[in-house]
Image (cartoon, grey):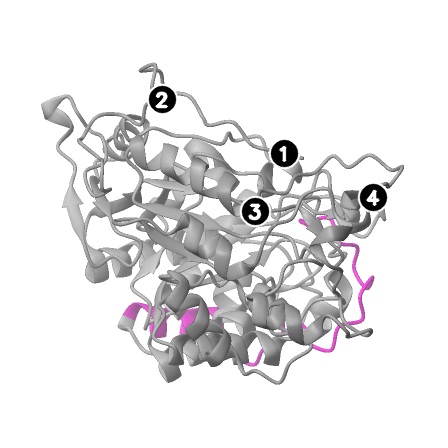
Amino acid sequence: MADAFRTQTGVPRGQYNFERQPETDQSFENALEKARAGHRLSVADGIELMTTGSETAGISQQRMGRVVKAADERRREVVGEEVTIVANLNNNVTSACGTGCLFCNYRDNAHTFESGTKEESRGFTKTPAESRAIVADAVDRGISEVTSVSGLHPALTLDENHREIIEDEIAVNYKPPAAYTKSPGTYTEQIQAMSMEGVHVHSMTPEEADHAARGTEWDYETVYRRLKEAGLDSVPGTAAEILVDEVRDVICPGKIDTATWFEAMEGAAAAGLPMTGTIMYGHVENEAHRVLHLKRIRDLQDRMGAMTEFVPLSFIHEDTPLVERDMVDAGATPAEDTLMIAVSRLFLDNIDHIQSSWVKFGNERGLDMLEAGADDFMGTILSEEITKRAGGGNGEFRSFADLTSLIESIDRIPVERSTDYDIRRRIDSANGRPGPGLGPKADLTPLLNRDGEETEPAILGD
């Protein structure tokens, strides 16, 4: 086989001596025929489709077109012509973190948040009261979902009982709230603060759940049940990155490993919480890692059946340590993005919904992904700090009017959905009020501030 290790994403050949390489004994034509026929694909099949043939280096535009066509046809069979959106707010609680992931420019060193430090922090921490005020304001403007993914602040514990247990621990990432200029409270306090009637709280990644169990012998089902009692409604499958440890050892050696990620997700499902799946690709991994990740996500869904959607996240590289250390010099190419969406649709035969992220792709390419197998176009995202800090430039806010217009421009049907897709409302833009209708205070008007202008809420900092 020719050397098919990705060069288009800026990773020099041979820089990482990974055991898994994108090479198979399968042929592209056989793999594509299986995909068209609706047969369950193997890892080898997925690699052939993701590489457009592992016998040659580079991506064949002609073959990619055939993969995209098969994925678009499968999307039409599974979900029809509807494109879903959600009225949502991102309320990340803190940027304080000590994990040190090399793909991340969101975090701020936790010690810079401590009282008396001479090093100025650029970051933020929100108290539970501040989180509640932000969510309440967004509810007034029509949202039905709040998503919260945060850094691993050393003072954050699951609850006060957890704090009592680890107060005397030495070998655990913990410092008391009194050590900081502002306390984030506990995870349960933050969830309770964001939980309002009619609003779906989507929070607590496996990495955060692990942080919420540190220093104890609690299993993840116990942690997630306590969070569910506090108001948690579903779990984001972020912190997955690439679910292959030889990649994780390069990009996030301080994070939980692959087995722990799955243990946490299984605990969340056992606690009765629906979840999403993700992949963050386009850095040091190759196509074999991407497809193995898909296989492991599909296996989890076979076991638990709790996953509502899959979200491919293209790595935003510009302002990250991976670039600063010359480990990569670019993210995924448009062709790689397209194949990631298309192969996800064809490979994940047990997950109905594939998301196209306008935050990651922008408007034009985001719409292209809706014609390559995706059927969800995210939502309003009233605030988004993570991608922005990594160098993303596609904005932080879209009104329902904007999203509806974009979806209709490719002759698809805009539909408002609940987080878990259980409730769906077709958006009738002809009535002149294509706003959200599912939130507790949504009345089909655009998402407005109290002065009647479409603006984003302020971000509270230290």
Dot label at residue 324: 4
Q: Position of residue 327 (x, y in %)?
A: 81, 52
Which residue matches tag 2? 449
N-terminal-most mark, 2 or 1: 2
Dot label at residue 261: none
Q: Which residues are magenta?
A: 7-36
Residue mark closest to the camera, 4 vs 2: 2
In-image side of 255 versus 64 (left or right): right
Three-letter code, disc 2 = Asn
Dot label at residue 93: 3
CA gap, disc 2 to disc 1? 20 Å
N-terminal-most mark, 4 or 3: 3
In-image side of 21 versus 209 (left or right): right
| Secondary structure of residue under mark 2 | loop
Three-letter code, disc 3 = Val
Which residue matches tag 1? 461
Q: Are marks 2 and 1 in contact (CB under 8 Å)?
A: no
Camera-nearest residue between 59 and 422: 422
Q: Position of residue 92 (x, y in %)?
A: 54, 45
Asked whether residue 108 is in view, the answer is: yes
